Amino acid sequence: MNPLRIVFMGTPSFSLPALQMLHVAGYEIAGVITQPDRPQGRGQIAAAPAVKILAEKLELPVFQPENIREETSVEIIKSLSPEMIVVAAFGQILPKKILDIPPRGCLNIHPSLLPKYRGAAPINWTLIKGETKTGVTIMLMDEGMDSGDILTQQETDIIPGENFGHLQDRLARLGAQLLLSTIDQFIAGAIDPRPQDKEAVSFAPRLTKETEKINWRESAVNIYNLIRGLSPAPGAYSFLNEKMIKIYVAEPLMEETNKTPGTIVEVAKDIIKVATGDGLLLLKEVQLAGKKKMPVQDFLRGYQIKTNAAFGS
């Protein structure tokens, strides 16, 4: 049996295990479609997407269309004659004229248990909302946003204290493994695609600066979930003495206080405790604007903070 001819579409590090495993498994990868190089960092130097770097290392042809809906993009994919398209965090919604190209369909790896958390930031919102379980879904794509029929799913417990970076890496590997077994079963006709339950749909919209801003009137647990849902990037933030401080690691403490939310109630050698709407938040790793990320004890050596100072806007 000839190996299945696949076009792979993906952009960030989440996509890498799937591309690597497809390659190792011997599928014929006709081409890799990824986003264009984008300016990054303080110097705004153009940087290649993670998928492009891996694809070039694997000596696979790479295409970087600015807009996947343009006719030139469609013609590129047609010219590659894929039997199947596999998508993992590509970053653009595919139009029907691309979905209709491969006779075996377009499969997508989505890092949630659909229909929960459709959208651009499912892993972030899973943590922000304090979920204890999540998983990956392999779905057959349609023209909607993560609304296609489900092929397979695998659930996993969220590890206590797990942040976005750790969970993303774990789900990327889990999704890639599930993809390989799903392709084989799907091609063999052993899977019946099932529609998503429309009554159970929830969404995970793109993160904004307002999303990332800490509201100290929330409970310590909710703020803790926001922080780990945004760590190591983009980072939850607040302002202290008109300077932005990002908080990457914290711990909720079920200690009562009558202080106004946002007030620093204790400062010691390696301790910053902040009042919230319910409980205290112990800060553990922070970053002052323009400085490096550091443990609180190192931060306090170079930045003086007084009890009763207050975080706010």
Image (cartoon, rainbow, N blue to C red):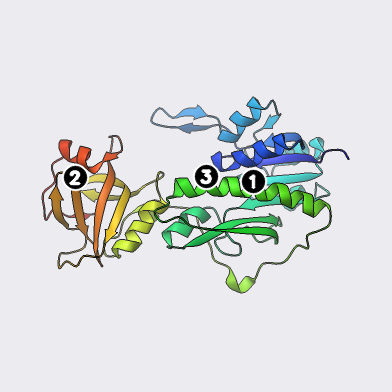
- Which mark, by number, is residue 169? 3
Q: Is residue 13 visible?
A: yes
The type of residue carrying mark 3 is Asp
Q: Which residue occupies the foreground of this view, 222 or 202?
A: 222
Looking at the rendered structure, the secondary structure element under dot 1 is helix
Q: Residue at label 2?
A: 270
Q: Earlier in the sequence, mark 1 or mark 2?
A: 1
Mark 2 vs mark 3, CA separation in Å? 30 Å
Quadrant into which the N terminus falls: top right
Looking at the rendered structure, the secondary structure element under dot 3 is helix
Mark 1–mark 3 CB contact (< 8 Å): no
Quadrant into which the C terminus falls: bottom left
The type of residue carrying mark 2 is Asp
Q: Specify whether 247 is left or right of 258.
A: right
Mark 3 surroundings: few (<14), some (14-19) or many (≥20) residues within 10 A: some
Q: Earlier in the sequence, mark 1 or mark 3?
A: 3
Q: Residue at label 1?
A: 176
Tell me: residue 109, above or below residue 16: below
Who's the residue at 30% across and 46% down the image?
246
Who's the residue at 17% across and 41% down the image?
300
